[in-house]
Image (tube, rainbow, N blue to C red):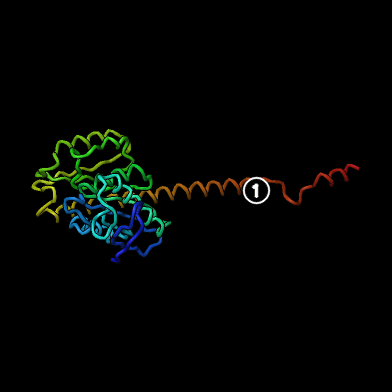
Amino acid sequence: MPEVIFNGADGRLEGRYHHASERDAPLAVVLHPHPLHGGTMNNRIVYDMYHMFVRRGFSVLRFNFRGVGRSQESFDHGQGELRDAAAALDWMQLYNPNARGVWVAGISFGAWIGMQLLMRRPEIQGFISAALPANLYDFSFLAPCPSSGLIVNGDRDTLITVESVEKLVDKLKQQRGLEIGLEIMPGADHFFTGCLDRLNEIVEEYLDMRLAALQEEAKTTSGRRSARAKAADDETATATEQAPGDDEDSDDDVVAKAG
């Protein structure tokens, strides 16, 4: 788990990065809670999600937003932090040009930033949001939401109402071709105190399900491409068989015989 310092949009950012062994390994970036309320890349949920992706063969980055730890600049109310997240993904893609997919995970404030990043980066194919602050920030930018994902909130969260999360999810579910999973955890507060093991189970089960589906989809797509390629080869072969052979009379031979 090497420490890394990389260039952000407005200054250097501090992170922890795991580089997968496979050249085309998918990427994941994990975003921490609010910088002004103790949020750092060493948050327990961030740490657990980071290692969840590592165990599944991802190249993974968690980092401190501006003004946290050794990251430069200062808190920017979301705008600068979104630029930080975009720079983090740019940095990962620079070293992983063959990555076969991207995921973003975030906790609370980090979930809000992650959903905005999702809208700006079409290569992101999935998201995981814990303690999504549906009643604290404007999520109208999710129109439409470009990728499926999972949202997990607690029913004892004193900052985020269950109703606001359910209302947002109901709105997103109206979009065709989009699957949004929602888990409201009984007894869980904003930080999932005493519920982290259950949170990890829910998130890992969802990720495994999605990865299996994506793998099956890739196999199906590959099979269709192979079938089309075989059909094209067969068509070419048939056309070749029907073409005039070398032993047939050429136009000059016909003229000579006629003379």
Residue that appears at 86% across and 43% down = 255
Residue that appears at 15% across and 43% down = 184
Task: Find residue 99 and report its image quarter.
Answer: bottom left
Mark 1 crowd level (few <14, some 14–19, many ≥20, 10 Å Cα): few
Q: Would you place residue 41 above or below residue 120 in this image?
A: below
Residue that appears at 22% across and 47% down = 109
Residue that appears at 34% across and 54% down = 8
Q: Which residue, as the protein is rendered here, is positioned at the far front?
A: 73
Q: Which residue, as the protein is rendered here, is positioned at the far right?
A: 259
The one nearer the camera, 173 or 75, is 75
Q: Is residue 223 visible?
A: yes
Q: The N terminus lies in which quarter of the figure?
A: bottom left
Q: Amino acid at mark 1?
A: Thr
Query: Which residue is tagged 1?
Result: 240
- In the rendered structure, the answer to whether residue 88 lies left or right of residue 186 reads right
* Relative image position of residue 202 (x, y in whole percent): 19, 51
How many marks do you count on the picture? Answer: 1
* Callout 1 secondary element: helix
* Relative image position of residue 55 (x, y in whole percent): 27, 61
* Relative image position of residue 259 (x, y in whole percent): 91, 43
Q: Which residue, as the protein is rendered here, is positioned at the far bottom?
A: 2
- In the rendered structure, the answer to whether residue 64 lies left or right of residue 194 reads right
The one nearer the camera, 240 or 91, is 91
Q: Is residue 207 visible?
A: no
* Relative image position of residue 35 (x, y in whole percent): 21, 51
Task: Find residue 19 and report its image quarter.
Answer: bottom left
Q: Would you place residue 181 above or below residue 102 in this image?
A: above
The one nearer the camera, 102 or 115, is 115
